[in-house]
Image: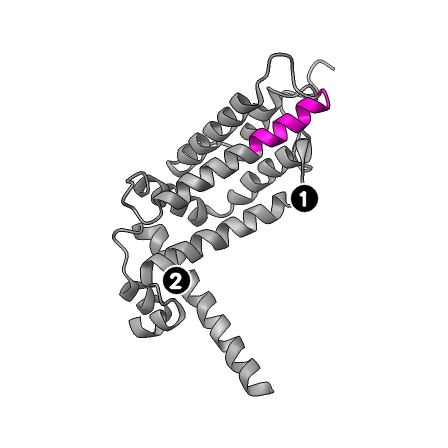
């Protein structure tokens, strides 16, 4: 049945184009100042065409864009535990250094979503709680293996790791020269008995001197 399969493929491609356009528009203007018409113009179709694929309009587009991005990040952490999970957080930050638009969109939208009336408020609130619980769980797993330094509390370690991640992303977007991945790795290392490995193509400037 080549016809239906062909139509399904075209529909999937159009949805992907609309999501790419929504991502670009949300990144540039934020959610509040964006419109379905603007997204439609970006793709070269009508507003009705967008609503054909996303019946919920702008809210549905926002949800789809956020879920698409998170799915990619969560794929890095899938089936990882303990130290491997923490190393995955560093890998995600390293990948984001080449995805400025993604980071910018999240910072923009998360700032807007502080308002409880914002349509993404619950999404960002639940997402942050979910991530904090997962990072705390990883630190607990490391602790169970004797890999945390004495006196380190997994919950506090998770909060500090997330706070540093958020802060570094903001500094980076504002033009500060920071290495998000390596700086986050160093923060995590403060809690560990054995440090996480540096990036393969880098050498930690604090290592090797005086050895």
The verdict on residue 142 being magenta is: yes
- Mark 2, Cα crowd under 10 Å, few <14 / some 14-19 / many 20+, is many
Q: Which residues are magenta?
A: 135-146
Among the 4 quarters of the image, the one containing residue 203 = top right
Q: Is residue 206 above or below residue 128?
A: above
Where does label 1 land, which residue?
79
Q: Give the percent coordinates (x, y) of residue 77.
A: 62, 43
In the picture, measured across the screen, residue 45 lies left or right of residue 184, that is left
Residue 144 pos. (x, y %)? 70, 23
**Disc 1 crowd, CA 10 A, few/some/many (<14, 14-19, 20+):** few
Q: Residue at x 62, y 39 (%)?
A: 88
Taking the image as drawn, is residue 191 in sight?
yes
Residue 56 covered by magenta stretch: no
For the C terminus, the quadrant is top right
Q: Secondary structure at mark 1?
A: loop
Vertical arrangement, residue 184 with respect to residue 35, above or below: above
Q: Choose the circle earlier in sequence order: 2 or 1.
A: 2
Q: Give me the residue at 56% from left, 40% from top.
A: 94
Image quadrant in which you'd find residue 91: top right
Q: Position of residue 10 (x, y in %)?
A: 49, 77
Residue occupying image coordinates x 45% and y 37%: 128
The label number, if any, that marks residue 21 in the structure image: 2
The image quadrant where one finds the N terminus is bottom right
C-alpha gap between disc 2 and disc 1? 32 Å
Name, please, the residue furthest toward the left: 33
Badge 2 marks a residue whose secondary structure is helix
Q: Is residue 93 above or below residue 67?
A: above
Work out whether residue 34 or residue 205 is closer to the camera in this orientation and state it: 34
Lateral position of residue 162 relative to residue 125, left or right = right
Number of numbered discs: 2
Can see residue 195? Answer: no
Left/right of residue 182 with respect to residue 67 in the rendered view: right
């Amino acid at each position: 049945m080549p016809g239906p399969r062909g139509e399904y493929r075209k529909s999937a491609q159009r949805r992907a184009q609309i999501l790419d356009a929504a991502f670009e528009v949300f990144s540039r203007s934020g959610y509040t100042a964006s419109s379905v018409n603007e997204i439609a113009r970006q793709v070269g179709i009508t507003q009705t065409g967008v609503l054909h694929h996303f019946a919920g309009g702008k809210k549905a587009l926002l949800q789809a864009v956020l879920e698409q991005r998170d799915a990619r990040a969560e794929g890095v952490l899938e089936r990882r535990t303990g130290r491997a999970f923490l190393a995955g957080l560093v890998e995600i930050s390293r990948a984001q250094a080449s995805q400025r638009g993604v980071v910018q969109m999240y910072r923009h939208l998360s700032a807007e979503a502080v308002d409880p009336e914002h349509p993404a408020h619950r999404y960002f609130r639940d997402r942050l709680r979910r991530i904090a619980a997962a990072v705390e769980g990883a630190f607990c797993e490391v602790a169970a293996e004797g890999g945390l330094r004495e006196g380190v509390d997994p919950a506090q370690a998770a909060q500090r790791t997330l706070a540093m991640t958020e802060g570094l992303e903001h500094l980076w977007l504002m033009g500060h020269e920071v290495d998000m991945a390596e700086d986050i790795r160093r923060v995590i290392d403060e809690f560990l008995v054995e440090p996480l490995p540096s990036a393969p193509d880098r050498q930690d400037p604090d290592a090797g001197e005086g050895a």
